């Protein structure tokens, strides 16, 4: 592992580079800058703060992270912590190659935009014009829907998890992805109705790109994006068995002293799978900000936020999302694949870019990214205007009338509301903060529950409707009632058979070869637990003939009773 003195020597080199840049003396500056009388920033203090942020991973016996910060396209800080490969005693450095998880998605978006600018596709094209194996659901799914997570397509990884052959248990490639999607009999929702994160969209976009260029997406990316920008250590993990010099391994944190290997074993890429460094990511951030790759129209298209069918603007564009931190607008994405974690953010008004790559699961990219941003932008943070009152006081009796069980008809989710310590809460611990007599903010999020009456809740985001809950009675079935659900059920969509047995006050799901899951009753004919959310459907005679499973990014997968 790099010793602290060496690590700080590197940091000192970056501090010197930053100081020279501040004085307008870098060779990359095309126009001389005015000499500033402001003192150079105290980078030693900032370095100490960053070291403290990553102190839990600054070890010779544990994985860790690399971090880099740039301003105006010039990288002025980088550091690395922990080990790249524990089996071979290799330390992380700022040049270590990691996998970028879903940060990878914006490069698929960029490839699509390049093809659009060349007149080879439109973002409004029907995806079935390119991929006829995708089922016809009666509604047009466009390329833009794929890239903005508004297609309604089920996430293929959630489907494999239902089958028991998830992404970490079997090697998948794009043929598998297309085959899985081709079997899905339903969408989660009509295209454009909602935002719901789905890796399927980005894998299908890769297949569309390859259909158009009649070449591999990996080669196209190399020639049209990576090489022109000088991202010399960036490539796709399109073959997970290929040797990649300088790549870190990835690990699951068992506890603070122990890890296990957790590297991807799939050929699927586009949704993730970008192999890169923190420095290359900052090069990319500058290019996507300035239009260096393909001009101003490219930049505009990459950041175009679509409207949902209800008129609300979706804050997710082509692999990037908007947000605000320290009162400053940002463009950002995080990533997680197997044991890799990633964070990439830029603050356009400050021209600051922050990139973080880690190789262990207990590194929270969003939290680390916020903390690093605060170190380098604390002097530029904007004090927010006086916020509206956080809450109003409601008597316990006024809160109690909202308590009870509610269901979401779209995906079957059961939400139980209860009053504890004079606070209305959900059964998973979220506090509902009263903003008025019938409007409650869910913790610190932008999502609200608005009670039309005591039995119906409208879910809103930024004032727009995003779903509806309705009151239901809690279900406490007898042993004989539980026995009605026993049987064998099969899903064509997941190519999976399950057996259900009744045991005491719950149902047990049995799946080949030896998996079992317990689910507990929530509301009439509905259960929830380790296998997901189950809703049973009856025929006109009252006999159970089908169940609907909601799990992860699958809302309503049907299993027929055999």
Image (cartoon, rainbow, N blue to C red):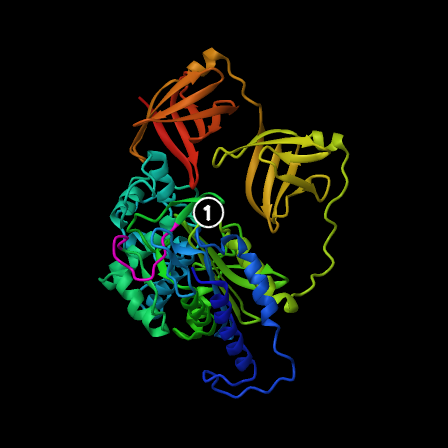
Residue 4 drawn above or below residue 253: below
Identify the image quadrant of the N terminus.
Answer: bottom left
Q: Who is closer to the viewer here, 265 or 334?
A: 265
- Which element is circle 1 on? loop
Residue 13 drawn above or below residue 165: below
Which residue extends farthest left? 214
- The magenta region covers 239-250
Where does the image place residue 79, in percent across and percent down from the top left? Answer: 48, 65
Q: Who is closer to the viewer here, 140 or 237?
A: 237
Where does the image place residue 464, in percent across and percent down from the top left? Answer: 58, 49
Where does the image place residue 552, in percent across and percent down from the top left? Answer: 44, 39
Residue 258 drawn above or below residue 80: above
Q: Is residue 241 magenta?
A: yes
Residue 141 seen: no
Q: Residues within 10 Å of mark 1 (few under 14, many from 20)?
A: some
Q: Residue at x 32, y 66 (%)?
A: 115
Q: Residue at x 37, y 73 (%)?
A: 229
Position of 246 with respect to 522 (left or right) is left
Q: Mark 1 — residue?
A: 196
Q: Who is closer to the viewer here, 390 or 437?
A: 390
Residue 314 drawn above or below residue 17: above
Position of 251 with respect to 79 (left or right) is left
Q: Main secondary structure of the magenta part?
A: loop
């Amino acid at each position: 592992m790099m010793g602290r003195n060496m690590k700080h020597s590197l940091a000192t080199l970056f501090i010197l580079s930053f100081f020279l840049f501040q004085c307008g003396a870098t060779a990359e500056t095309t126009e001389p800058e005015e000499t500033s009388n402001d003192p150079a920033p105290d980078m030693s203090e900032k370095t100490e703060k960053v070291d403290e942020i990553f102190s839990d991973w600054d070890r010779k016996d544990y994985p860790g992270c690399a971090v880099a910060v740039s301003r105006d396209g010039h990288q002025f800080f980088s550091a690395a912590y922990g080990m790249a490969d524990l089996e071979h005693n290799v330390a992380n450095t700022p040049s270590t190659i990691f996998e970028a998880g879903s940060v990878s998605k914006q490069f698929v978006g960029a490839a699509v935009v390049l093809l659009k600018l060349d007149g080879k596709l439109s973002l409004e094209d029907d995806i079935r014009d390119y991929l006829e194996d995708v089922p016809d659901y009666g509604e047009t799914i466009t390329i833009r829907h794929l890239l903005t997570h508004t297609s309604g397509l089920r996430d293929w990884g959630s489907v494999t998890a239902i089958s028991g052959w998830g992404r970490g248990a079997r090697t998948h490639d794009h043929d598998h992805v297309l085959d899985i999607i081709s079997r899905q009999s339903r969408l989660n929702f009509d295209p454009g109705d909602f935002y719901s994160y789905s890796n399927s969209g980005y894998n299908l976009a890769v297949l569309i790109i390859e259909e158009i260029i009649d070449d591999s997406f990996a080669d196209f990316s190399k020639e049209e994006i990576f090489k022109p920008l000088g991202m010399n250590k960036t490539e796709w993990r399109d073959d997970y068995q290929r040797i990649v010099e300088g790549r870190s391994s990835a690990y699951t944190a068992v506890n603070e002293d122990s890890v296990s290997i957790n590297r991807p074993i799939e050929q699927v890429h586009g949704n993730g799978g970008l192999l890169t460094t923190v420095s290359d990511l900052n090069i990319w951030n500058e290019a996507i900000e300035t239009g260096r790759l393909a001009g101003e129209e490219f930049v505009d298209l990459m950041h175009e936020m679509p409207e949902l069918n209800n008129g609300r603007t979706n804050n997710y564009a082509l692999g990037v999302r908007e947000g605000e931190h320290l009162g400053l607008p940002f463009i950002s994405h995080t990533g997680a694949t197997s044991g890799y974690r990633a964070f990439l953010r830029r603050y356009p008004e400050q021209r600051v870019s922050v990139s973080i790559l880690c190789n262990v699961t207990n590194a929270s990219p969003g939290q680390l990214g916020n903390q690093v941003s605060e170190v380098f932008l604390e002097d530029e943070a904007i004090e927010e205007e006086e916020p509206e009152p956080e809450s109003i006081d409601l008597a316990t009796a006024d809160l109690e009338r909202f308590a009870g069980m509610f269901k979401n008809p779209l995906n079957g989710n059961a939400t139980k509301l209860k009053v504890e310590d004079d606070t209305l809460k959900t059964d998973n611990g979220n506090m509902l903060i009263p903003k008025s007599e019938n409007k409650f903010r869910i913790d610190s999020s932008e999502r609200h529950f608005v009670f039309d009456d005591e039995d119906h809740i409208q879910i809103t985001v930024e004032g727009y409707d995003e779903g509806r809950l309705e009151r239901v009675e809690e279900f406490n079935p007898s042993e004989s009632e539980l026995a009605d659900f026993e049987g064998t059920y099969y899903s064509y969509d997941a190519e999976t058979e399950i057996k259900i047995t009744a045991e005491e006050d719950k149902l047990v799901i049995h799946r080949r070869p030896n998996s079992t899951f317990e689910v507990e009753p929530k509301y009439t004919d509905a259960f929830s637990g380790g296998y997901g959310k189950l809703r049973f459907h009856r025929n006109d005679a009252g006999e159970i003939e089908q169940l609907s499973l909601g799990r992860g990014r699958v809302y309503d997968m049907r299993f027929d009773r055999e």
